[in-house]
Amino acid sequence: MEEWTKEEAERVYNIPTWGEGYFDINAQGDLIVKYNEKIKPINIREVVGEMKSQGVHFPAVIRFHDVLRSQVIKINKTFGEVIDEAKFNGKYCGVYPVKVNQMREVVEEIVDAGEEYNYGLEAGSKPELLSALAYNTNREALTVLNGYKDEDYLRLALYGRQLGRKVIVVIEKYSELPKLLKLSKEMQVKPLIGLRGKMSVKSRGRWAKSTGDRAKFGLSISEMIKAVNLMKKEGLSDCVKLFHFHIGSQISDIRTFKEAISEGARIFTQLYKMGCHLEYFDAGGGLGIDYDGTRSTSDSSVNYTLVEYVSDIVYGLKQICDLESVPHPNIVTESGRAITAHHSLVITNVIDQINVKQPNHDTTQREDEHHLIKNMREMHRWDMVEDNFQEIYNEAIQIKDQALGAFNLGVISLEDRAIIETLYWQIIERLQKLCKTLEFVPEELHDLEESLAPQYLCNFSVFQSAADHWAIDQLLPVVPISRLNEKPNVECSIADITCDSDGIIKKFINKDGISKTMAIHEIREEEEYLVGMFLTGAYQDVMGDMHNLFGRLHEVHVYGDNDDPQGFYIEEIIKGNTASAVLSTMQYNPEYMAQKMKKNVSKIVSEGKLPPRQGVKLVDFYEDCLTSYTYLRS
Ligand SMILES: *Cc1c(COP(=O)(O)O)cnc(C)c1O
């Protein structure tokens, strides 16, 4: 084994950049989680050991709740510091958008960590509002309501007001306003109202459709004026409290924010001067994550830091308010991704390897070989050098194609084909080695490395655990959790266990940027090789689907504890879906299925085709599988 330094490992997997300081490598080459100087680091391998001793198998989600808390504190502190430094008169009143990760434990942890900052919640649908009403009981914290609303949604919001909560209904569509006013008269509750602006700033990248004239949400300038006039006419202009915009998620270029803040601040000050004494400026979500660690404007990265983002909002807003002589409002942001992405990871094991190259058939020369074999041998005998490799490559490909044709016509045997293909792969292997030493490699051989990379088969489903990777090409860091003091000498890609050819990870961080393969270790016999998929805490955590009926993963919730010998404890285990649970969601009745199996087995037994003892075993095993985890037992 070749020694490897921590710096080399960090460079290949880009850990310091995407990790936000939460991940590190210890002297034994294990990946560790660290929060701050006060809490002892946690070794992920040790968490896995404890998980397994408690009967939790792969794949599993590990949640580090301290990371979640730490992110909540970080955003609140940063806003606090920048606001003080800028002598800005408003406060920061952030909210967490529930849709980014609706898990109760996640919402509870965020509300708890944010309590001292009066950090609130944002809801975008009725069920989310139901959860916000139950969990955001802090009367100083905001509950911001977005999304299209029916009468029930609005009624719930007004009940929230009756409970003394700061529930702000953001008007996404003009028609919601008269509905809300009618209901508030009927219930005799004064609403708190927000207006969402349709921004014209061009958001770049994937969420570009969130802005512009054809954006789905928000009021145009003329609709906003109409809304303000209506409120004035009703004598309710003091109910309009908040101006809101949201220009999309994962904004990778800071300039997009700068432009949105200018436009938003101008609209805000104008509305103020029209007589709506707004108290809150809500800049929505969009704070991005550096998934690939490149600090760039690529779709999976960001070219700014949290402090830069916060400064742009605070200073940008202050400047325009001061110019327009409008008092500084309180600032709201609705960051979801940046709060939750880092706290969870999916851990799984490599169960097998799929190789493209198969140089293992016996190629000893026999008498009377078919001329195609002879031709391939000829190529194989050539000494491959810079001058002839292209010719050998072209020739070898042609012979391999001819051999396939000959095989399909019944001219050569299975044995012949195996010899030809083995020789071919040996030639390709030599070619690959040669290409690595060359300065100039022809275009068609560029992808040779990638196309020859083995696939490591991992026990998980891309559709369940990396939905964003599959659907929108979001890059997720994939890193082995141990042996990081050892040089990884295999380039491979990762496939899941679904029977879908889309079930692969096709984009990795690599030392030269982004590539289709990742550096990984050769797997030793009898070794359990574990890889973690990181930054899965936002969106994909809750977006998994039922593809192949794999369902939700086991989950463990980890807290740091300095008094514990290992520095952590597992506070909760949530078991993933059993086969019968996922079958039930598809309208199957597992009990009935078991009965049906039993009846069928009895019939076969009574016909004398199966010994009764075997029959009982079969039924027991069927029932055992129904109540077991859907993923591979390993
Ligand atoms: C989705 C959403 C958010 C969260 O955005 P992030 O980019 O995850 O911070 C905030 N506000 C609204 C209105 C949203 O729809």
Image (cartoon, helix red, strand yellow):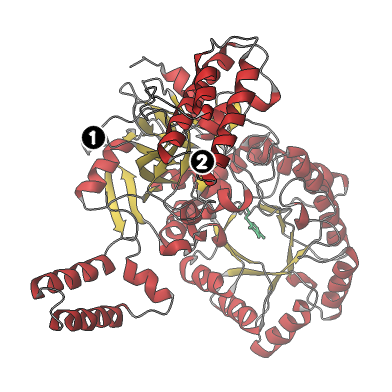
The picture places residue 222, in percent across and down from the top left corner, at: 91, 67
Task: Depth check: give the residue in front, 272 or 244.
Answer: 244
- Within the image, what quadrant is residue 594 found in? bottom left
Relative placement, left or right, of 581 versus 300 is left
* Mark 2 CB lies closer than 8 A to ligand 1: no
Ligand 1 lies in which image quarter?
A: bottom right
Amino acid carrying label 1: it is Glu
Q: Residue at point 40% right, 20% down?
A: 487
Relative placement, left or right, of 436 versus 325 is left
- Residue under pointer 1: 526
Can residue 380 be seen here?
yes
CA neighbours of label 2 inside 10 A, class few (<14), some (14 to 19), many (20+): few
Amino acid carrying label 2: it is Val
The picture places residue 409, in percent across and down from the top left corner, at: 54, 46
Q: CA distance from mark 2 to mark 1?
A: 43 Å
The picture places residue 622, in percent across and down from the top left corner, at: 23, 69
Q: Secondary structure at mark 1?
A: loop
Task: Depth check: give the residue in front, 412 or 345.
Answer: 412
Q: Residue at point 30% right, 23% down?
A: 28
